[in-house]
Image (cartoon, rainbow, N blue to C red):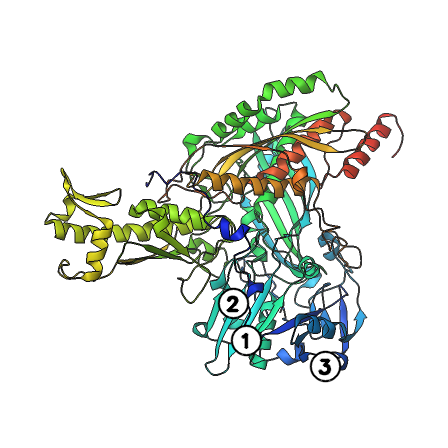
């Protein structure tokens, strides 16, 4: 493994100066000669038939160039495909038209597009499109949607069921028959909205002379956009160039191919001029894919001593009105397979029902299935501890997979690569001084506040591939990483990667990896990404896969270059190749370090080609397509303490400790940043955030005034630490860390609040645990104590 001075160093992010000084180029900064602007007319109804559309007013609006409806797209723009066709689930994939033609199915569904000389004229024109709707009954909740008599969204999906998927392992019936106790609970994992700083946008430029289309788009995976849009638009892939410039956050929501991007491309092709569309914040809330939205009934079978025996349950996963790009895979593969958590769990019998409703499509949001699984398992562990009279830490410790058991295949069939869960737990407990906090809690409140201590011991699946597994679980693509490293005659290095960093810092970490491998200064390494015309094919940035997969590709490509250089150096030094070593940017003869050539000297000779070994090609360039042999499985323990004010219901976080093990950390500074951001997002789900629809399908939390994105003043100081358990199958021993905070923190925070409320007899509350939610629960508990019916 490459562990040198830059691997593990706190190198400042090289991308930050341009980002924080406003010098970066985003999609909305793209300006082309003759540029037109598009505004999309969206349905105000959650469910309605389109009786007629009057475009006359829009066409008469000054500046308007064209107006298109769904009928105009017929035969020219295909439906948006779902790209995760989970097997053995009777998956229904109703067509998802870019612009609705006969029926709208959620508020925000596109019904027309207006193209004008400027954005304001386009908006004016859109406001003058008159649509005659015949409203239809609406259903927004998954369980109601599968009930008899519920409005049907798609004829192809009876009872609005998109799929039924099961995961089983072990003998669950026997486990529950043998149990001393069964802990049952209903959990709601509420719907969330991504809230990236930059909303989505696209600029399409079709060249009628060549048939080429260039599309600038806010994308986490431009190559996937190219593949899918090639099919949707009927443009050969080699004629379609997708450029994803700087992207201002995604959290998963910019993985997917949306109708809007196809609409903009269609407009450019029809009009022969470039067309731009940039989502406003209201559109962003309405139509950019939402996350989570699970309702789960689950039971855990345990022995009296806390030993886990089995788990069974059913989740209703609200998928919204249409299947988004990866939607079926999130509540199944990424959720259902992780229900063992960090524990030895002998049996699972679990079903996921994917359901269509009159709401915005739901897809991957930071963590994607794993926060839902971790929350479920970790809440059950606390509930079980409470019912058995055990300390919440002790029941976890008793059921951990031991470090000597790795690699460990859990009952759902996946194999964890490595782990030392007890070490991470003990580290966190020491950092908090757990016994002291329990003692403080036992002494009782001195100021009326209730003290709670919450824990979450998690493991997550990331580093997505390997590709054969992706194919086996229905993902319609590969999951390898790619890199092309081009060393120039002067020894300067370009690294072209297939991944698409968008704020995580990989421009810096990848440069660290290549700098170390090649022994060149980090300033001599440039990382290039985001343009399908110049970068190698890649499968995108999501699922904490960019570093474990993409950085591995960089390392492998760099090692190919080193080996080529070794041949050249041996030839120049007149030494056997086996005797030539490479360290610190120098090739030298073993035992004779003065007989040496620098990496730069060897590279120059590779390009001059005056004196190369016979048969060796000139140049210094290598590519690698790294397909991992397994996923990686980061893990850790998060601890949280809270003070709950019983008079207001307010919960204040007084400590937050995160001990994460992401294998070897390339850049601890960046790891901490990703953990901080992740904790904040998960904490927000626990306490504040929720996307709420009313019974008519109207999004009540459709603005930043209504949707509780946390402010810096609401977030406590995080104390972070790491343990280090390298992945044994990874060339660099790294695992990935981008989602760990979001996965661990909801359970840690909720467990802490419920721990504080336990003396009042409050067993469980669903997220978000707002002050109002907690206050109401306290009042009901007090009335119950007094024998008063709530």
Give the mark nearer the N terminus: 3 vs 1.
1
Up/down of 770 relative to 303, above or below: below
Residue 184 is situated, as x and y percent measured from the top left of the image, at: 68, 36
Q: Secondary structure at mark 1?
A: loop
Quadrant assignment for the N terminus: top left
Which residue carries the number 2 mark?
A: 228
What element does badge 2 sit on?
A: helix
Is 118 located above or below residue 504 in the figure? below
Q: Residue 396: x percent and y percent? A: 56, 29
511 left or right of 782 in image: left
Q: Which residue is mark 1?
A: 33
> Which residue is pictured at 63% across the width and 34% down the height?
716
- Which mark lies nearer to you, 3 or 1? 1
Residue at 75% across / 75% down in the picture?
A: 129
The quarter of the displayed image where residue 390 is located:
top right
Which of the numbered marks, if any, corresponds to residue 59?
3
């Amino acid at each position: 493994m490459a562990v040198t001075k830059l691997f593990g160093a706190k190198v400042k992010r090289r991308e930050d100066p341009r980002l924080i000084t406003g010098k970066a180029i985003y999609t909305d900064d793209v300006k082309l000669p003759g540029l037109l602007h598009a505004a999309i007319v969206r349905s105000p109804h959650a469910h309605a038939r389109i009786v007629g559309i009057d475009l006359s007013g829009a066409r008469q609006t000054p500046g308007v160039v064209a107006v298109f409806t769904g009928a105009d797209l017929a035969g020219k723009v295909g439906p948006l495909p779902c790209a995760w066709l989970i097997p053995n689930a009777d998956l229904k994939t109703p067509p998802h038209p870019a612009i609705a033609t006969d029926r709208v199915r959620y508020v925000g569904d596109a019904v027309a597009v207006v193209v004008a000389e400027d954005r304001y004229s386009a908006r004016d024109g859109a406001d003058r499109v008159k649509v005659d709707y015949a409203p239809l009954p609406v259903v927004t909740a998954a369980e109601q949607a599968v009930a008899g008599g519920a409005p049907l969204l798609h004829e192809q999906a009876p009872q609005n069921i998109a799929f039924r998927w099961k995961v089983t392992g072990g003998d669950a019936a026997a486990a529950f028959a043998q149990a001393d106790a069964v802990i049952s609970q209903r959990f709601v994992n509420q719907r969330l909205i991504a809230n990236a700083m930059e909303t989505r946008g696209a600029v399409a430029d079709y060249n009628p002379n060549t048939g080429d289309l260039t599309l600038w788009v806010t994308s986490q995976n431009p190559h996937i956009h190219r593949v899918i849009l090639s099919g949707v638009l009927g443009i050969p892939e080699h004629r379609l160039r997708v450029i994803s410039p700087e992207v201002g956050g995604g959290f998963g929501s910019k993985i997917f191919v949306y109708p809007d991007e196809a609409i903009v491309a269609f407009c450019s092709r029809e009009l022969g001029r470039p067309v731009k569309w940039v989502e406003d914040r209201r559109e962003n809330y309405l139509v950019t894919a939402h996350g989570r939205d699970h309702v789960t009934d689950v039971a855990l079978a345990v022995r009296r001593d806390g030993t886990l025996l089995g788990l069974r349950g059913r989740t209703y996963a609200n998928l919204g009105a249409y299947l988004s790009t990866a939607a079926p895979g999130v509540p199944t593969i990424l959720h259902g397979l992780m229900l063992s958590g960090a524990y030895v769990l002998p049996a699972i019998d679990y079903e996921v029902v994917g359901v269509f409703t009159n709401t915005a499509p739901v897809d991957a949001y930071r963590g994607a299935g794993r926060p839902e699984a971790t929350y479920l398992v970790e809440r059950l562990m606390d509930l079980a501890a409470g019912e058995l009279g055990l300390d919440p830490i002790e029941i976890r410790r008793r059921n951990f997979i031991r470090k000597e058991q790795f690699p460990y295949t859990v009952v759902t069939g996946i194999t964890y690569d490595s782990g030392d869960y007890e070490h991470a737990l003990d580290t966190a407990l020491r950092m908090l001084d757990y016994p002291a906090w329990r003692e403080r809690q036992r002494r009782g409140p001195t100021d009326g506040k209730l003290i709670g201590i919450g824990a979450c011991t998690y493991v997550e699946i990331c580093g997505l591939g390997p590709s054969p597994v992706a194919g086996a679980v229905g993902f319609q693509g590969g999951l390898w990483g790619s890199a092309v490293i081009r060393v120039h005659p002067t020894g300067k290095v370009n690294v072209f990667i297939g991944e698409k960093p968008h704020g995580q810092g990989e421009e810096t970490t990848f440069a660290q990896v290549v700098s170390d491998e090649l022994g060149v200064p980090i300033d001599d390494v440039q990382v290039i990404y985001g343009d399908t015309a110049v970068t190698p094919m890649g499968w995108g940035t999501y699922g904490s896969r960019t570093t474990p997969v993409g950085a591995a590709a960089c390392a492998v490509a760099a090692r190919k270059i080193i080996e080529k250089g070794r041949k050249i150096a041996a030839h120049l030094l007149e030494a056997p190749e086996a005797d030539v070593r490479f360290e610190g940017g120098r090739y030298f003869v073993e035992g004779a370090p003065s007989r040496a050539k620098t990496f730069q000297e060897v590279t120059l000779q590779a390009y001059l080609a005056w004196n190369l070994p016979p048969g060796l090609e000139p140049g210094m360039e290598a590519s690698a397509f790294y397909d991992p042999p397994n996923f990686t499985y980061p893990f850790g323990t998060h601890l949280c303490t809270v003070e709950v004010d019983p008079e207001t219901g307010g919960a204040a976080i007084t400590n937050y400790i995160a001990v994460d093990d992401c294998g070897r950390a390339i850049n601890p500074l960046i790891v901490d940043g990703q953990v901080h951001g992740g904790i904040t997002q998960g904490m927000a789900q626990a306490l504040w955030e929720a996307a709420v629809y009313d019974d008519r399908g109207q999004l009540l939390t459709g603005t930043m005034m209504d949707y509780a994105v946390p402010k810096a003043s609401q977030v406590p100081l995080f104390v972070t630490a790491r343990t280090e358990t390298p992945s044994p199958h990874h060339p660099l021993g790294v695992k990935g860390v981008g989602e760990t905070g979001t996965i661990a923190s909801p359970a840690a925070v909720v467990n802490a609040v419920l721990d504080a409320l336990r003396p009042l007899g409050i067993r469980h509350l669903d997220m978000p645990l707002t002050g109002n939610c907690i206050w109401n629960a306290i009042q009901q508990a007090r009335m119950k104590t007094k024998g008063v019916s709530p």
